Amino acid sequence: MASCLIPFSMIWLAFECQMIMILMYICICNAITDRQIKEAVENGATTLGDLQFELGVATGCGRCMESAMELLPTPAF
């Protein structure tokens, strides 16, 4: 069996040469990941309200609100 050498700094795990992506859940109540939020931002979401409407983030317990807002673009002045 060939061994897979992957730098530790990558956000991937190697198991028998298969790549497994690690998901970072931002909203546990609604199972929303950072990738989903980043995709929504790429598609035009600019406010927490946009994320709440599109994904449902921060509509349960609200503990994820700050983490979700950190992924929003900063306003340009």
Image: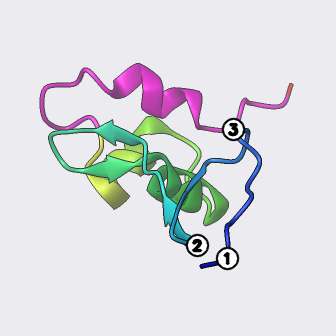
In three-dimensional space, the C-alpha distance between marks 3 and 2, rounded to whole angstroms, equals 36 Å
Mark 1 and mark 3 residues within 8 Å of each other at the beta carbon: no
Q: Which residue is mark 2?
A: 17
Question: Quadrant where the C terminus lies?
Answer: top right
Instruction: Judge the density around disc 3: few (<14), some (14-19), many (≥20) Cα neighbours within 10 Å.
Output: some
**Label for residue 2?**
1
Q: Quadrant of residue 75?
A: top right
Q: Position of residue 14 (x, y in %)?
A: 56, 60
Secondary structure found at label 2: loop
Name the amino acid type tagged 1: Ala
Residue 72 belongs to magenta span:
yes
For marks 1 and 3, the one nearer the N-term is 1
Q: Which residue lies at the image location 51% right of the left edge and 55% below the top edge?
A: 35
Q: Residue at x 58, y 36 (%)?
A: 71
Q: Main secondary structure of the magenta part?
A: loop
Label 3 is placed on what type of residue? Pro
| x and y, in percent, of residue 31 in the image | 23, 50
Magenta-colored stretch includes residue 3? no
SS under mark 3: loop
Q: Is residue 23 left or right of residue 62?
A: right
Image quarter hosting the N terminus: bottom right
Front one among 7 and 37: 7
- Tell whether 33 sits left or right of 62: right
Question: Which of the pair 24/32 is nearer the observer?
Answer: 24
Mark 2, Cα crowd under 10 Å, few <14 / some 14-19 / many 20+, is: few
Q: Would residue 69 appear left or right of 75 to someone viewing this image?
A: left
Report which residue position mark 3 lands on.
73
- Reading the chain from its start, which is encountered first: label 2 or label 1? 1
Q: Secondary structure at mark 1?
A: loop
